[in-house]
Image (cartoon, helix red, strand yellow):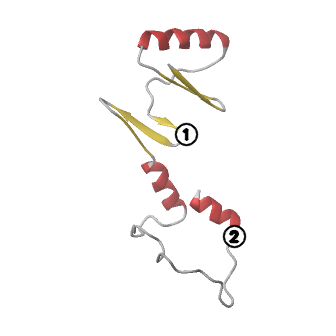
Amino acid sequence: MIICLYVDDLLIIGSNIEDMAEFKKMIMQEFEMTDLGELSYFLDIEVKTSEWIFMHQKKYAKDILKRFNMSECNPIITLVETGISVQLEGDEEEVDPTLYKQIVG
């Protein structure tokens, strides 16, 4: 069994359902918690299970594009030409570092 704790989110992963149920029962006696059932989202990662476990951040990426009005932009593999050097020229506006960090995550 693997137990992941992030702030106030607890994720329990295991191959033995009975062991996981027993652990949840014990932990719920000690702490106030809600069992949300089978995992679908954890830390903005969508998880789909069948024979395999598939994890992606498609919704998170779409939300970022929507937030910065880029939903209709065309995807490309590389944003800039490789091997060139970038230099500041003239009177360009300075980039807001906080906004830039929000965009690039």
Which is nearer the N-term, disc 1 or disc 2? 1
Quadrant hosting residue 53: top left
Between 72 and 87, the one nearer to me in the picture: 87
Does residue 85 lie above or below 64 as drawn?
Answer: below
Query: Looking at numbered disc 2 in the image, what kind of residue is underneath it?
Result: Asp
- Please indicate whether residue 95 sits to the left or right of residue 10 in the image: right
Marker disc for residue 22: none
How far apart are the two marked residues, 1 and 2, measured between alpha carbons? Answer: 26 Å
Looking at the rendering, which quadrant does residue 71 occupy? bottom left
* Residue 23, x across and y down, in percent: 54, 12
Task: Return the x and y of residue 51 as percentages of the image width and height.
Answer: 29, 29
Q: In the rendered image of this protein, does residue 4 appear above or below residue 47?
A: above
Residue at image location 58% in from the left, 62% down from the top: 103
Q: Quadrant of the C terminus?
A: bottom right
Q: Which mark is residue 43?
A: 1
- Give coordinates of residue 22: x percent, y percent: 51, 8
In the image, residue 91 sits, relative to residue 80, either above or below, namely: below
Which of 23 and 72 lies nearest the eye of the viewer? Answer: 23
Residue at image position (70%, 78%) is 94
Q: Secondary structure at mark 1?
A: loop
Q: Pointer 2: what residue? A: 96
Is 56 above or below relative to 18? below
Q: Secondary structure at mark 2?
A: loop
Image location (x, y in percent) of residue 87: 63, 83
